[in-house]
Image (cartoon, grey):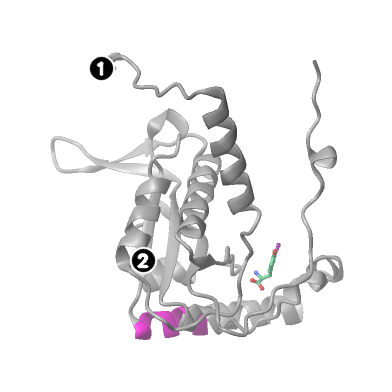
């Protein structure tokens, strides 16, 4: 049996041209101030900012509207300590043995290493999971696998919206991908259909936070217009 499409009139706010430009420019200039932060203050953050960011992420378009994401928010100090310990063990192995010289050279301008104190200092870690397939209960109470489409793309779009929301809320973030990330499924007790996608420490930057001196490519290098 297939569910048939049901349509409803679109709610769409048409903006005046000057309002379009003002909104577009304001968003651009706010987003240009976003930086990945690796030194966090332990200062608490209002939970609603996290909740609203996840709700914003969950508005993302997704393959077949399957919304193949789970956001696990970790505030518990002991759990953060365990995540840090496991991430540092993997990262240490990566930096000291697994990563190629070419990879380490590419990372050199960022000044990263295996130490991840931000995983404990940041008041929240948002661990994003990708639902590689769905699990649905059938009528007999048996779990059935449901194929998911474009999960990597869908979760990537959602994470982009999440980062934008947190930035506009005046918070700092890091998109952190310890590798491999399977320890997160174990520590957070996630089901077999979910795979860790990224860990995002969220909070205020430490008072003395520093960021690498790096720049974004100019528009002419990333935008091609064919009229
Ligand atoms: N996961 C490691 C290494 C790392 C990899 C990339 I690609 C980066 O852009 C940054 C770091 C780490 O988190 O240090």
Q: Residue at x 33, y 79 (%)?
A: 76
- Where, quadrant-wise, is the N terminus in this rendering? top left
Q: What's drawn in magenta, residue-wise? A: 77-86
Left or right, residue 27 beside residue 57: right
How far across and how far down the image is residue 125, in percent? Answer: 43, 70
Q: Considering only order in the chain, which callout, 1 or 2, is on the residue closer to the N terminus?
A: 1
Using the numbered discs, state the Cα–Cα distance from disc 2 to disc 1 in whole angstroms.
Answer: 37 Å
For label 1, the SS is loop
For label 2, the SS is strand
Q: Nearer the viewer, residue 126 or 96?
A: 126
Q: Which residue is mark 1?
A: 1
Q: Residue at x 60, y 52 (%)?
A: 31
Q: Which residue is mark 2?
A: 73
Left or right, residue 94 beside residue 201: right
Question: Is ligand 1 within 8 Å of the beta carbon of the residue shown at mark 2?
Answer: no
Magenta stretch, main secondary structure class: helix
Looking at the image, is 2 positioned above or below residue 153? above
Looking at the image, is 117 positioned above or below residue 153? below
Left or right, residue 8 beside residue 204: left
Q: Tell me whether circle 2 and circle 1 mark residues in contact (CB < 8 Å).
A: no
How far across and how far down the image is residue 51, in percent? Answer: 32, 58
Left or right, residue 166 beside residue 47: right
Quarter-of-image position of residue 78? bottom left
How far across and how far down the image is residue 135, in percent? Answer: 31, 44
Structural crowding at the residue carrying mark 1, measured as other residues with C-alpha within 10 Å and reported as few (<14), some (14–19) or many (≥20): few
How far across and how far down the image is residue 2, in percent? Answer: 29, 17
């Amino acid at each position: 049996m297939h569910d048939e499409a049901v349509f409803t009139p679109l709610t769409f706010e048409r903006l005046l041209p000057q309002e379009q430009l003002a909104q577009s420019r304001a968003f651009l200039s706010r987003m240009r101030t976003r930086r990945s932060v690796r030194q966090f203050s332990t200062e608490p953050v209002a939970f609603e900012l996290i909740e609203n960011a996840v709700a914003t992420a969950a508005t993302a378009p997704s393959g077949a509207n399957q919304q193949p994401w789970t956001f696990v928010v970790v505030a518990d100090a002991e759990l953060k300590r365990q995540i840090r310990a496991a991430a540092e063990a993997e990262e240490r192995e990566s930096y000291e043995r697994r990563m190629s010289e070419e990879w380490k050279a590419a990372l050199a301008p960022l000044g990263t290493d295996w130490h991840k104190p931000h995983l404990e200092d940041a008041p929240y870690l948002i661990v994003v999971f990708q639902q590689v397939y769905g699990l649905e209960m059938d009528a007999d109470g048996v779990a059935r696998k449901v194929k998911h489409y474009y999960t990597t793309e869908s979760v990537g779009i959602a994470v982009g919206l999440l980062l934008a929301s947190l930035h506009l809320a005046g918070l700092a973030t890091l998109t952190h991908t310890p590798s491999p990330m399977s320890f997160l499924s174990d520590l957070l007790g996630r089901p077999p259909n979910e795979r860790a996608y990224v860990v995002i420490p969220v909070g205020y930057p430490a008072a003395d936070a520093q960021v690498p001196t790096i720049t974004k490519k100019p528009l002419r290098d990333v935008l091609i217009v064919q009229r």
